[in-house]
Amino acid sequence: MDKLKSKDNSSIKDGINNNTYHLLFGDYNNLPKEEQGSYENVIAYITIDCFTKFQEKKIFIKLLKLFSQNSVIDLNKITFNEKIKQYEYKNNNLTITFDKLSNCFEDKGLIKELTSNKRYGKCHSRAMAISPSIEGSRIVTGYITLGNQKILHSVIEYEYDSKTIVLDWTRNLKITKEQYIELTNFVELSSFEGKKVIDDIEIIFKNLNIGVKTYVVFRDELIRDMQKNPHIFQPTEKVKKLFKHLEKKKKE
């Protein structure tokens, strides 16, 4: 969206002062040493990131592993555990168990995206697109810390077999929340049910000119404010019915 100017000449984006917007949504480089993630975790992260780009072609994987031995990325640290039917990254005292998210899809277009650089930069939008189709799932947004960088990031979470599973589109990753936090130091800022996105397209995006970052972080606050201040937008009959339904559920 176009940037507006506030009274003090600072830019406005999504209705938020530009300085505030950057504080909320900007990625951070050169974190203080005491806030940085470990070097070992960075190596694990980029090794898994590299591995999940490739599909199961044994000859190609063999050549890739041979090539990677002379770099910080050593794909030989990743093996397939037949017993649990998942991949394992092992290095020193760090073990990360995971699967490829692409193994959950049959759509060739989605698989192609997940196993290529096209997956990058789509964490918020793909979480919004995929989560509504996963029963009981939530869109969770927070910060991951990798080395000296802190990055705003969205993932999908759902419960399975008494565990919380995380789906990270930008890394083609399916992993338990416990292991995901161990790998990325993920700190949650907000979460909401994925199925709510369907109604929110009608309620929020057709009435407010905001970006996906603002939406995933402030979704619940936006809905509350819109219910309290209906004069700020022109609700359709469908939206009015949705608000009445939400109000009724609140009272139950």
Image: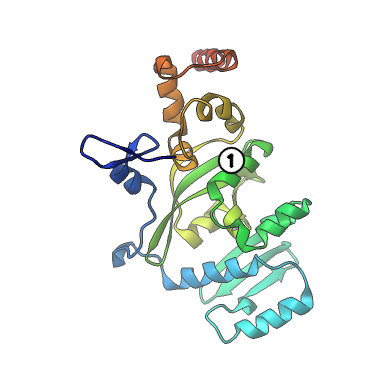
The quarter holding residue 11 reads top left
Left or right: residue 58 versus residue 182 is: right
- Residue placed most toward the observer, 37 or 4: 4
Q: Label 1: how many residues lie within 10 Å, few (<14), some (14-19) or many (20+)? A: many
Helix, strand or loop for disc 1? helix
Q: Residue at x 53, y 46 (%)?
A: 124
Residue name at image x 53 percent, y 57 percent: 180
Judge by depth and name the residue closer to the eye, 191 or 203.
Answer: 203
Is residue 209 depicted above or below 162 in this figure?
above
Residue located at (57% from left, 87% from top): 70
Left or right: where 176 falls relative to 161: left
Q: Is residue 171 left or right of residue 133?
A: left
- Residue 144 at x, y percent in the picture: 45, 56
Looking at the image, which residue is at 50% across and 17% down? 250
> Percent x, y for residue 47?
57, 71
**Viewer-nearest residue: 144 or 126:** 126
Among the 4 quarters of the image, the one containing residue 128: top right
Q: Which residue is mark 1?
A: 128
Residue 188, horizontal then vertical, whole percent: 44, 46
Q: Of the residues shown, which amino acid type is indicated by label 1?
A: Met
The quarter holding residue 115 reads: bottom right
